[in-house]
Amino acid sequence: MSRRLTMILIDQETDMLVNIDMQKTFMPGGGLAVTGGDTIVPIARRVTDRFRRESRTATLDLHMEGHISLASSYVGIDSHTMVNFEGVTDLKGVANPDRLAARALFSVDDFMDYMRKVKRQVLWPDHGLYHTEEARLHPAFRRDEFGFILVKGMDPKCDSYSAFYDNLQRPTGLAQILRRQNKRRVFLQGLAFDYCVGFSALGAVTEGFETYVIEDATRPVGYPADSVRNMYAQFRAAGVRLITSADIGA
């Protein structure tokens, strides 16, 4: 995994920029605030301007109240609780109907089936709630300046980090769209490095795209403590390339 490359010249025909979850909900004051998340906005704006509309995609992380990934869907469970399938029946009785909040849009059986497949899940604070102001695209960006907007996370029974697959590994359709447009390289920026940006990068590699993460245009959640280190290790193994905004030429 190389951090410094010679200047990369953008090919508007074969390159795609993917802005990941540039929403206030992930910035200071938002439901799932990423430290310094707002500081990347000017950088991400400058990078976006180097790509024309047809070579830009944006994702939005949106959830309904009662989503399986939200701590508020459970009774007596703190946000930022990591649930592991092996111990799920012992973790404060999560796998118990009495532990599901009235707003939960899933059953205990749904929860157990999901955990059996994904193995572990962070229960997040409420964020990206559908129809809330903070869930919208950051005002530094307009929806109509992107060729495609991908909404992820709306299935109440499944979390969704990657722009290419949800957490049950079901494809979002983005790879097919990029292939139809003859895209070969994917550049990613946004929030957060160790989750949606990182897993989107890994998904892009899996789909056969040459993949770059613009490191100064992203910030991590940093939970759990090893999340950033683990993502770097996965990047090295997969061949994801780390660059900075200064490496990108017009």
Image (cartoon, helix red, strand yellow):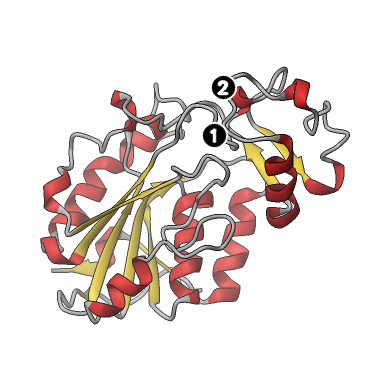
Up/down of 72 relative to 41, above or below: above
Up/down of 18 relative to 248, above or below: above
Q: Position of residue 203 (x, y in %)?
A: 48, 67
Q: Which mark is residue 189?
A: none
Q: Residue at x 55, y 27 (%)?
A: 125
State left or right for residue 189 relative to residue 10: right
Q: Position of residue 219 (x, y in %)?
A: 44, 45
Residue under circle 1? 67
Amino acid, disc 1? His
For mark 1, give the secondary structure: loop
Pointer 2: residues within 10 angstroms few (<14), some, or many (20+)?
few
Location of residue 61 by image quarter: top left
Residue under circle 2? 103
Task: Name the mark nearer the viewer: 1 or 2.
Answer: 2
Q: Residue at x 75, y 44 (%)?
A: 112
Amino acid, disc 2? Arg
**Residue 183 in view (yes/no):** no
Up/down of 118 relative to 183, above or below: above
For mark 2, give the secondary structure: loop
Foreground residue, 240 or 95? 95
